[in-house]
Image (spheres, rainbow, N blue to C red):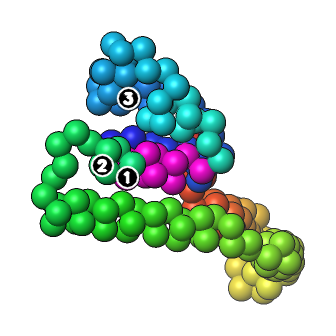
């Protein structure tokens, strides 16, 4: 349950224990009772790690191996395979986050939309009334620049999007 939260925080560059504490309290009650504050499964160790999701998965894997009652060999193999797949998912997400969109792409799009919007009134004057040109230009420009803004939001796939 903590993996998606650690992955989200890692990809967004956040570190917040407030989202993780309820999960750790629910699934690790012995840690609080035993006073094992320095154990490898402690929330502070995960929050302090460079890569929170991988630290969590490593902790989960080590907990699986050191469990007092080991599961069947097949079950352990399946669980380790699932952990490995999650590690690969973290790697793929990091590749997406770290792939830069060229700045020239953004600039080129912005310049093109600006030139188009500035030249649009001259081409519309030939085909419609002068009173209709300003609202039509404003509407078309709004559509173009809103599309550009959506493109900028999409460039940051793990960001907050339109949320404040």
Residue 127, placed above or below residue 129:
below
Give the magenta range: 51-61
Question: Is residue 58 in the magenta section?
Answer: yes
Between residues 10 and 154, which one lies in front from this camera angle? 10
The residue pinned by badge 1 equals: 61
The 10 Å Cα crowd at callout 2, few under 14, some 14 to 19, many 20 or more, is some
Q: Element under label 1?
A: helix
The residue pinned by badge 3 equals: 24
The reply to whether callout 1 and callout 2 are in contact (CB within 8 Å) is yes
Residue 40, placed above or below residue 83:
above
The reply to whether callout 3 and callout 2 are in contact (CB within 8 Å) is no
The residue pinned by badge 2 equals: 64
Specify which label sits upstream in the sequence, 3 or 1.
3
Q: Element under label 3?
A: helix
Residue 34 drawn at (x, y percent): 36, 15
Residue 21, placed above or below residue 76:
above
Residue 116 drawn at (x, y percent): 80, 79
Question: Is residue 96 in the magenta section?
Answer: no
CA gap, disc 3 and disc 1: 16 Å
Between residues 163 and 88, which one lies in front from this camera angle? 88
Could you say which disc has been placed on residue 134 in the image? none
Q: Quadrant of residue 33?
A: top left
The residue positioned 31% from the left and 51% from the top of the image is 65
CA gap, disc 3 and disc 2: 16 Å
Q: Is residue 131 visible?
A: no
Q: Quadrant of residue 27?
A: top left
CA gap, disc 1 and disc 2: 5 Å
The residue positioned 51% from the left and 54% from the top of the image is 54
Q: Is residue 45 left or right of residue 57?
A: right
Q: Is residue 93 left or right of residue 13?
A: left
Q: Is residue 155 visible?
A: yes
């Amino acid at each position: 349950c903590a993996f998606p939260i650690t992955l989200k925080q890692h990809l967004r560059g956040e570190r917040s224990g407030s989202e993780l504490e309820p999960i750790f309290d629910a699934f690790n009650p012995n840690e609080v009772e035993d006073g094992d504050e320095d154990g490898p499964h402690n929330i502070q160790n995960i929050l302090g790690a460079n890569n929170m999701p991988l630290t969590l998965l490593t902790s989960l894997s080590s907990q699986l191996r050191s469990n007092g009652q080991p599961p069947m060999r097949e079950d352990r193999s399946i669980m380790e395979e699932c952990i490995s797949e999650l590690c690969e998912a973290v790697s793929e997400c990091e590749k997406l986050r770290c792939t830069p969109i060229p700045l020239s792409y953004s600039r080129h799009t912005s310049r093109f939309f600006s030139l188009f919007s500035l030249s649009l009134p001259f081409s519309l004057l030939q085909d419609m009334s002068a009173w209709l040109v300003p609202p039509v230009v404003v509407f078309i420009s709004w559509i173009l620049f809103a599309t550009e803004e959506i493109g900028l939001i999409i460039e940051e796939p793990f960001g907050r999007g339109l949320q404040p």
